[in-house]
Image (cartoon, rainbow, N blue to C red):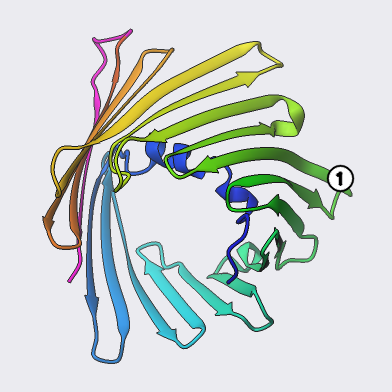
Amino acid sequence: MSKGPGLFSDIGKKARDLLNKDYISDQKLSISTYSDTGVALTSTAVKKGGLSTGDVGAQYKYKNTLIDVKVDTGSNISTTLTLNDIAPSTKTITSLKFPDYSSGKLEVQYYHHHAAFSTAVGLKQSPVVDLSVTLGTPTFVIGAEASYETAGGKLAKYTAGISVTKPDSCAAIILGDKGDTIKASYIHHLDELKKTAAVGEIIRRFSTNENTFTVGGSYAVDNLTTAKLKLNNHGKLGALLQHEVIPKSLLTISSEFDTKALEKTPRFGVALALKP
């Protein structure tokens, strides 16, 4: 794929990941292994409240083709087929889920030095069509996305965004919810490995005059341990500690407190991902 502006979903992604990625409120264990034939096998168990679920997934890559199959405890089978460069600078992704056939989707992505385009169509009689386009460079991007409901003949959503990226920082503004919400975010990296960073995000909803402001950051305690923290103006405080117990295997402990209602029980989550 050529180096260009990236997809619309990449706008503001670095700030979103720092504020949301790996924060969990349940218990999760995943174990990955690799067979001699090159198949990656992953078993996952999740306990949320009093409910336990699990799944087993297999992933196989051959040249430009990636096959991903997952079976869960609800007897659902999910299959994803990814094909790179069927046509120059394109990626095709087909996903199917059994027995819920209507959840299938076909997505085509096209990358250019100064543009990226994505379209996704649901595999059912009256599908929703998702379109997105970005223009620019790896450092400056402007783009938009929309969803069209063929059944009702109307736009289900439309969003526009812009981002500016520098080696140690990234700023983004996204106008979404059909113009009802505007989100601005800024992330600044404080080290070369980008493990220590500060981030700020503000969301304004015009219909309710509601503002949500969140600040957060990550700090590299050492080469194996990272701590994250976030706090919003509604008093929600989140903390996370992630440690590489053995190479490629991560232990994550996170918690969320309501500083305006300390009598409430804090939410805790633990995840252990073991990889060979």
Percent x, y of residue 183: 60, 28
The picture places residue 202, in percent across and down from the top left corner, at: 53, 22
Magenta residues (range): 260-276
Q: Position of residue 2 (x, y in %)?
A: 60, 69
Q: Amino acid at mark 1?
A: Lys
> Which residue is farthest bottom?
37
| Picture layout, residue 185 above or below residue 221 | above
| Residue depicted at 29% across the width and 76% down the height | 41
User: In which quadrant of the rendered view does residue 216 lie?
Assistant: top left
| Magenta span contains residue 219 | no
Residue farthest along the right direction in this orientation: 153
Quadrant where the N terminus is found in the figure: bottom right
Which residue is situated farthest in the left direction here? 245
Number of marks drawn = 1
Instruction: Tell me if 115 is positioned left or right of 32 in this view.
Output: right
The answer to which of 174 and 166 lies nearer the viewer is 166
- Residue at 59% x, 49% y: name it: 9
Q: What is the secondary structure assignment of the residue under circle 1? A: strand
**Measuring 40% from the left and 22% from the top, which residue is drawn there?**
215
Mark 1 highlights which residue?
154
Name the image quarter holding the C terminus: bottom left
Q: Is residue 142 left or right of residue 139?
A: right
Where is residue 25 drawn, in percent x and y? Answer: 29, 37
- Quarter of the figure with residue 76: bottom left
Q: Is residue 130 above or below residue 196?
A: below
- Given residues 188 and 251, the one toward you in this image is 188
Residue 128 figure quarter: bottom right
Vertical placement of residue 29 versus 258, above or below:
below
Is residue 261 inside the magenta stretch? yes
Residue at 69% in and 33% down:
176
